[in-house]
Amino acid sequence: MIRQPNAILGNDRLLVTLGKKGEIFGYYYPGRDTAQHVEESQACLYDGKELIWSNAREWVADQRYIENTNIVSTELIHYKGLTMNILDFVHPILPVLVRRYRISSKKQFHGKFFYYSSLQVGEMKKKNSAFCDHDSGLLGQYWKDYYIGISSNPRFEQWQVGKAMDTIWWTNAKYDMEDGVLQKNNEDIGNLNCALGWKLDIDVSRPAEITVLIGAAPDRKGLYRIMRKVQSEPVENIYNETQEKWIKWLSKKTLLELPDHPGFESFRQELMKGFNRSLLALSILNDPDNGAFVAAPEFDHEFEMSGGYGYCWNRDCAEIVTSLMDAGYPEYCKRFFKWCKDTQLPDGSWFQRYWLDGSTGPSWGNFSFSTQIDETGSTLFAMDRYCSTLEQNLKTEFLDTMWTTVLCAAEYLMKRTLDGLHDTCLCLWETHAGIFTYTNAAIYAGLKGAANMAREYNDKELADRWAERAEFIKNTTIDRLWLDEGYFARGIRYGEVDSAIDASIIGTFVPFNMLSARNKKEREMIISIIRNIEKHLRVPVNEHFGIKRYVDDNYIEGNPWIVTTLWLSKALLELAVTCCDKKEEEEMGTLINDALKYIRWSLKGSTDAGMLPEQVNKYTGKPAWAIPLSWSCALMLDNVLLLDKLRKGSRPE
């Protein structure tokens, strides 16, 4: 089942995704790419006549984050005069989701509060076991070394361990709730569901409060220990500790001074929120043990409409970690490059995508002709960017550790570019096979980066050799792929130039700097690329234009993407940064204005809670497909940091 979240939260061991009405869509433990244990999990009220599910259409929902945290507040208002406030946060240390429900009513309410779950522990529906230990206030469900427990404060009064496939009301927990009384079955095996119940008497002036705790452990003993510990902590204390944790983490970010630009004032706060939310989202999409990031929380587990997203792509991560570095978090670079050292293939390249532990993910890039060479170029480029920021002693230590990795990767790129263009491979979108402008730009940047690191490592011969090949690739790409129409062809397919315009050709400028904005001729090329992308790839939605990937894109109906749109705004801002005299002030203003429109459009396409998606639905303007996408978050950081750079650069010396 494909379910795109509206918000995410988590800690080092747990990632949770939520729907707009507080229903749990995903519960990933013990890692971001490991088993997803929940099929359905949400609250329900019984008013004496019928069940009122928290995700029912009758509730009007407002979901947002508590400022500067990964704590989610959901308010549900029902036409019957009921209000349900849900505060969701993950314990700062333990793998436990805390769900505080506060229910109020405009008139006296006498009924029940139920919490229903259909779990698939270990992503296994058929062979789960469950038990209810009421004396300990714990309902547990398990499969092999995955244990999920549900407890509460106050302790639940009723319970039912049921059979999800049954149609009999007294054995299926979902049906058992319908008369307001649960049967208190203590254990069962198979395809299970469960419900917990509390008597609910609400006075008009005094809301009722129930906290549900959902924890995970590798064994029964560990589950009891964790749940006992969290049951003994006052909920308010856990909340305060969680809030403090996130505010403290966010305080390390680069301090921003956004520009005083005409028409910009009202947008400043929105930009800051987008920046902070992107940082906070990335913090919980990262694997703290190994250093890699998932592209997005997995939502297409069966590969129904895609190849899945709960994996690490080196290309995405290269942009993510350097964006985080620029935002004030260089430690993510250090961990990721250690991960790269451990995952590099014997030929010096990196695979299409990986599980976060470094094992190769399911792939259609298993051969030399179907791999993605840009993954390797991007990785070297990012390594050099990080290396260049280090003080000399740390730089020496980094190069001593990583030199063999750099050497093998650079030599792999040399072998794949003998004629100045790369050998046949898959494009970055994993759609076409051939030779591509974007991939050549990534290889150029990778070899230039390797050459920089070789010079630092006092190997001038290798540095010169790699730099020479990089220039050969640049010149050959321009000679063979630049079109008279004023943009780069997508590439060469089946021996013929593929002149279809692809947003990724902006990669020749951002992020890979194959073209320089300070070179007059190349600057004209960059501007021409931007205007051609706008002309051919813009999609009108949300009062402006988003940029789709390429002209004949039919993936998820060819929606515009946040990544491609923010690439364009980033390119415009990079051009603005290089406007350095009074004659260019008018051009700078135009570039910034154009960029701000694309950034504003991207923020409009986020979820109600502020999550940046992969795409925006071209018909509705709503966020589409992978939510949140790490790559989108990274590019939002880049754009805001460039605006900050423009502000700081405007100061007189």
Image (cartoon, rainbow, N blue to C red):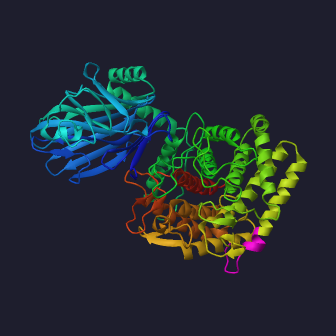
235, above or below 561, in the image: above
Q: Position of residue 437 (x, y in %)?
A: 69, 66
Can residue 487 be found in the magenta stretch? Answer: yes
Magenta-colored span = 477-488
Q: Is residue 236 left or right of residue 377?
A: left
- Front residue of 509 and 174: 174
Q: Is residue 45 visible?
A: yes
**Among the 4 quarters of the image, the one containing residue 50:** top left
Q: Position of residue 461 (x, y in %)?
A: 90, 49
497, above or below 408, in the image: below
Can residue 501 be found in the magenta stretch? Answer: no
Q: How many marks?
A: 0
**Among the 4 quarters of the image, the one containing residue 233:** top left
Q: Is residue 520 visible?
A: no
Q: Residue furthest bottom?
A: 484
114, above or below 419, in the image: above
